[in-house]
Image (tube, rainbow, N blue to C red):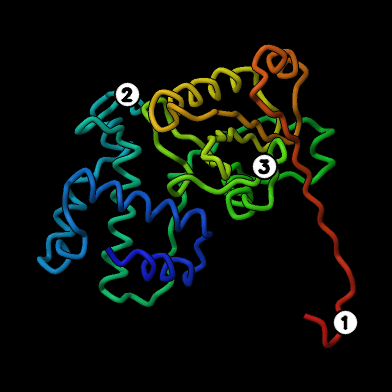
Amino acid sequence: MQENAFKEWLLNRGLAPSYSGSRLSFCRRVARAEQIDLDQEFDRDQLEKLISHLTYTRGDAVQEKANPTKIKINGLPFTVLDRCRRSVDLYKRFRLGETKEIIENIEDAETEVEDISPAENSEIAFGMESQLRDFIAQNIQTILINGKKLSLYDGGVEYYTDAGFIDILAVDAQGNFFVFELKRGRTPDYVIGQLVRYMGWVKQSVGKDKEVHGVIVAKTIKENLHYAKAVVPNISLLKYEVKFDLKDAVRGED
């Protein structure tokens, strides 16, 4: 697969680096699962058949009167298949040499509607959880957690696990894992259980001999989370702030 060229093609069409990286990661996942080479499939004119094989939407699940979150095909939830399908479709368009701008609906970035109090509304917050996720992913190497610099693990954005999607999965220089759970507004109590579930999956699969840390990032950290952190010491609680300034434009300045 022409990974570097594909990623550059995505970036040139205005897609965020983290989103482009996740598309590449899903293409790799398809190639491994199907034991194929996407370039060979393109040369054989078989990518469209592969895309059809991966297609399964929420509408299909609803039509079958099934719970969409429970639907699995070939062992994968339909949401994963849909992301795989979108990614392979993008790769096909890349190989076809399409130059038109991509208008990609990023609905497959699972965002949650969160309540934001009037007090929080007086401050600037990210409008969508995906915006917070992309900002952190793009700047991951500048963010210190416990004094350690991090990098994304295997694409690291919307990382699929049997326990659900991890917002961001990162590692430090020693290979220890950091599982990020992001909330653009307030942090509901269940976030601790959600994060610990992801951490447990990481520990039992890719991080067996490594430390696994959890990181909750939100606009507001509720008092209940501080109580929970008292008995889960390897979890960090971080608040984000968004600063926005306007100033007079001076001719000659960038």
Residue placed under numbered mark 2 in the picture: 70
Which quadrant, please, contains the C terminus? bottom right
Q: Which comes sooner in the sequence, label 2 or label 1?
A: 2
Return the mark for residue 98. Answer: none
Q: Give the structural element (helix, strand or loop) at label 1.
A: loop
Which dot, 2 or 3, sits closer to the camera? 3
- Element at label 3: strand
Q: Tell me the kind of residue under disc 1.
A: Val
Q: Is residue 66 left or right of residue 219?
A: left
Q: Residue at x 69, y 47 (%)?
A: 143
Q: Nearer the viewer, residue 35 or 72?
A: 35
Report x, y in % for residue 8. Answer: 44, 70
Residue 191's x, y, as percent? 60, 23
- The amino acid type, in three-letter code, at marker 2 is Lys
Is there CB contact under 8 Å for labels 2 and 3? Answer: no
**Structural distance between the alpha carbons of marks 3 and 1:** 39 Å
- Which of the two residues, 140 or 66, is positioned nearer the viewer here? 140
Q: Is residue 15 above or below residue 112?
A: below
- Residue at image position (28%, 27%) is 71
Residue density around tag 2, few if under 14, some if 14–19, many if 20 or more, within 10 Å: few
The span from disc 2 to disc 1 (Cα, nearest Å) is 56 Å
Badge 3 amino acid: Lys
Counting residues from the start of the chain, the first of labels 2 and 3 encountered is 2
Residue 250, labelled with which disc? Answer: 1
